[in-house]
Image: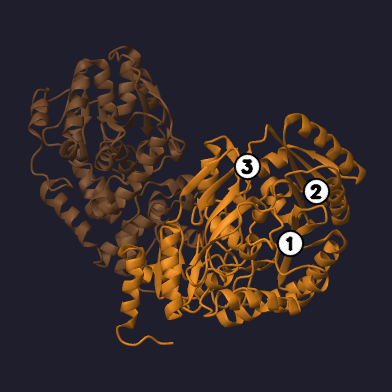
Amino acid sequence: MGMAASVQRIVDNCRFCWMCRHICPVGNATGTERNNARGRALNISLVNRGYSFTEDMVDNVYECALCAACTANCATGFDPTRFVKAARMEAAAEGLIPEPVVKILASIAEYGNPYEAETIDPDLQKEIASLPRQAPVLLYLGSTARYLNPKAAVTAIKLLKKAGISFTVLQDEPDSGLYKLNLLGPVAEARNDLVKAAEGINATKAETLVAFSPESAKAFLRDYPEQNVSLTPKIRTFTSFIRDLIAEGALKPRRSRTLFTYHDPCTLARDLEEESPPREIISACGSLKEMYLRGKNTVCCGSGLLALYKPELTEKTAAVRWQSAKETGAEVLVTACPACHNVFAKTKPKDMELCGLETVVWEACK
Amino acid sequence: MKLQSFMFDMILSELEDAVGEENVSTRQIDKLTHGVDYFWLPRMWADCGEELPQADVIVSPENTQQVSAVLKIANYYKIPVTVWGGGAGSQGGALPMTGGILLDTKRMNKVLEYNPQSMYMRAQAGAIWQHLEWYANQRGHSTMHFPGSVNCSTLGGFLAHRGIGVLSTKYGKIDDMCLSMEVVLPNGEIINTLPVPKHAAGPDLNQIFIGSEGTLGVITEANIRIYELPQRRIFRAFLFKDLSSGIAAGREILTKIKPSVMRLYDEAETASIIKKVLGISKPGVFMNFALEGLAEVVAIEERILLQICEKYGAEDMGSDYGEKWWQKRIDFFYPGHIMDLPQMFGTMDTIATYSNIEKVYWAMKEAIETNFPMARFIAHFSHWYEWGVMLYDRFIVDNPPQDPKEALRLHNQIWNTGVRAALANGGVINDHHGIGLKLSRLMKEQYGPAMQVFAGLKKALDPNGIMNPYKLGL
């Protein structure tokens, strides 16, 4: 396999090491030996030593949620997501991309989003149309909220309106390009999408971009700089932005008696190291009972690409997280990520409620 | 026996009927992934691009009844069954050396009962130990079992290989922590050991299956102890001038008090690993202690510990090293810290009485260093009893032969030499990693005529010889 020496070194160090097994959300949910960093590294290392790179092995690298729990847990500091991405790039080069991935890529090419969505929800369209074309703040909704969770997107817009923020949302918002980057690895085709999206965002001349989805925030704050793609606005997460609005008094939530528990999205807690703002927001709206594994030790629910690639796998990962949520005794599971929200909504148990963080604040501010 | 025509698919459909189609795999990736455990040999084999041991089918049951169904099928068709928990064993115990069925237990991962009154929890054998520890922690308790592989090994794996953790001196080995078990016998019958481990109703069935490495059946559930979290845990490290004074001090300490951690490193390990990780560069042998429990008891124990160490001329190194070691106790097992290919290495842990342990140490050291000048020998003593102590000795060959067959030959020669030196001086083949494939050939040398007891059990319980062939000398 034509991997960079630095990536090859990670493969060789992970191929006989199980020390992150306990924290892998996919491996723990399936109980399958191949579904962890060691399983993937071992098979990639075998390819590097003469075994064939098979469809089975490609499938296994796409079964990774790229949640980076293994990376955060490695005492030596290795990052297994790097060889997962490199193996995906190799699969693309060798024409071994699995059918579901081909479908996602075709959707991105045709519709500009991974969901084969041609239009957005009329209510969301109406809200966006009510906003000025240009403003100092650009609320970037992201494809998941725009096409799969428009209610959350509408609520986010209403919330910023209530706070008196001068902001805009792009009518034709470009996809961040993160999914293609994660599906194909850092190839030119994927980078071109980032460049195109950056051009669209920079053209708004907004001073601040508030990324509604943690996935988008992670893309703008981590992946774009890694790929040397520049964005002119200052990037803020939606959660830190709302936290500040509450602190400044622009939003005044009333504290209810509701007992919430909070699921840290991996991109927010691990990639962006943001743990406090969502908790401060929830505490302003009600009581918070924490899950045992939280913050940078959060357990991925299987949202994002994995949910598109293998929804049946996501049902298992989400069920594990719901179980942890139920053990807290809380009434409501809150998440700050529209992608996580979608996965949780599909697997919600009858005896607990699910709520996006934007809706928690909106209801408390009514 | 070679299966003809569609017979393989016939059996496959029976297995799918037993555990569900999605839990039966003949995918190449699953066979390869189960073809390498933590044993040095398959790792070397994989790195050389050699053919790996492969099961014909991987089966993942989710409960005892499904394990029973699988074993009934295997026993009828006389198909070998190898049980795989975490696969993190260092002895090759989980390798499917004759193909057949590989039974992966990790879907059996539930806690079934939590009983704070009797201080135990019941769990399925495929549960990863760290998950059990977290479960206990959330309820204000601990399992107090902290082996290096706590993140990756399963309850069943620890029981099957008679594992041990770093707090063993106070809390015991896995066999001390297990109250009772459920086992599926090779014919598919489900049995339970008695509900308590202490009784006079004949031999203890627990101790027949603990350490049996999947050769007598499949451990499916167990009741394991939970403990109160200690009010206080303190560390204290010392530098002794030599091994003899360190061992003598350790022996005397255990006649008076019960530390949870006692780790004495020989000069070679003090000068290598301890220097690298903890920064100690003085000559001598380093020894680290932990005391824990009620604060007032710990205070008394600390006073006694200091008195005894002073009596044996040890230099008090304070508590910082011990605390640092505790925080980093698992880091030693991550890549970059632990030995790895292309090195050849092995942990020859053994145990002996205080009368014999130094003889065992010096005999093994001399045997390895004299016969294999290319090998380094390092050791520490880390699980202590009132009657003796475990020797965790390792050999490391930095530049082993590149030819895999030559490397295998040298590897086995070093092991034979080291183990025979231990046996000749009152040691045993192994203390807490098990026998597996690696040491199977030496079991008869260790046991002599006593081996017929194991052989008799094997013949009675597994007359078709389907369970984990070539392991444990059976």
Rendered colour, chain B: orange
Q: How many residues crowd around disc 1 within 10 Å: few (fewer than 14), some, or many (20 or more)? A: many
Q: Where is residue B107 in the image (x, y as percent from the top left)?
A: 42, 56
Which of the marked residues, 1 or 3, is nearer the chain's N terminus?
3
Cβ atoms at labels 2 and 1 below 8 Å apart: no
* CA gap, disc 1 and disc 3: 23 Å
Q: In this image, B473 relative to A217: left or right?
A: right
Q: How many residues crowd around disc 3 within 10 Å: few (fewer than 14), some, or many (20 or more)? A: few
Q: Which amino acid does label 2 sit on?
A: Lys
Question: Which secondary structure, mark 2?
Answer: loop
Label 3 resides on the chain identified as: B
Q: Mark 3 points at which residue?
A: B327
> Is residue A5 visible to the viewer in this orientation of the structure?
no
Number of numbered discs on residues? 3
The chain letter corresponding to brown is A
Question: Which secondary structure, mark 3?
Answer: helix
Question: Which secondary structure, mark 1?
Answer: strand
The residue at the point 10 percent across, 37 percent down is A120
